Image: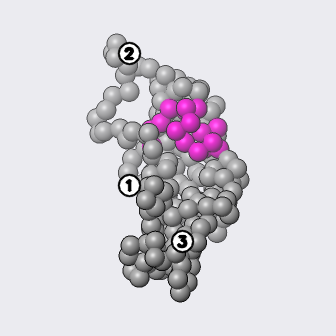
Amino acid sequence: MMKNFFEILGIVLAVALLSGCVQPEEGDSIDDENGGNNMVEKVETGNSISVEYRGTLEDGTQFDASEGRGPLVFTAGAGQMIKGFDAAVIGMGLNEEKTITLQPSEAYGESDPSKIVEIPKANIGDANSLEVGMSVTSSQGVNGIVKEIKENAVIIDFNHALAGKKLTFWIKVVAIKK
């Protein structure tokens, strides 16, 4: 059951981190459209950057990493990443590495009790197939985790899986482009 939870957690985080991001294809050039090299020395807001990263929880459990997928590519300061990760890369140099620890407010926010809801089983089509720890999607497309199953209701937490958690990231900048 815990293994399933961490698999779901990794998928949720990967989707969140990669939303709006593009992975470079092998052989992609970092030259601009005029044929010139457009690399810069330090990350500035608006730069397209590539980073290798690893994310862990306070207990050291890894929840996500770029290893095996290639660098993560995004526009620095454009809000494509969680706030603390985005801020941490500004000013980093090419091949510079750092480890940061983010408070919930810099990552996915605090857990919001109003997003933990009790839903009558009668309102859930396949309620008998649910298990604690299972990932579900609401009719509005919001992902949640089954927290408790009662006789006539199910408790589902619709907070982000990493809400309320301190996150540590190791980051290495591997490309910077204006």
Question: Mark on residue 33?
Answer: none
Provide the secondary structure element on which disc 3 rests: strand
The verdict on residue 34 being magenta is: no
Judge depth for marks 3 and 1 and give the one in front: 3
Q: Which residue is mark 1?
A: 68
Q: Please state the horizontal and vertical placement of residue 6, each as a whole percent of the image.
A: 49, 69
Residue occupying the far bottom of the picture? 151
Query: Against 152, is 40 above or below?
Result: above
Q: Residue at x 48, y 57 (%)?
A: 142
Amino acid under disc 2: Gly
Query: Against 83, is 154 above or below?
Result: below
Q: Which residue is mark 3?
A: 119
Q: Which residue is mark 2?
A: 36
The answer to whether residue 111 shows anywhere in this view is: no
Tell me the magenta residue range: 72-87
Q: Quadrant of residue 166?
A: bottom right
Q: Please state the horizontal and vertical placement of residue 177, each as a whole percent of the image.
A: 47, 26
Q: Residues within 10 Å of mark 3 (few under 14, many from 20)?
A: some
Residue occupying the far left of the picture? 27
In the rendered structure, are the residues bearing label 3 and label 1 in contact, judged by CB atoms less than 8 Å apart?
Answer: no
In the rendered structure, are the residues bearing label 1 and label 2 in contact, judged by CB atoms less than 8 Å apart?
Answer: no
Q: Using residue 137 as the reference point, say whether residue 157 is left or right of it.
A: right
Residue occupying the far front of the picture? 122
Q: Residues within 10 Å of mark 2 (few under 14, many from 20)?
A: few
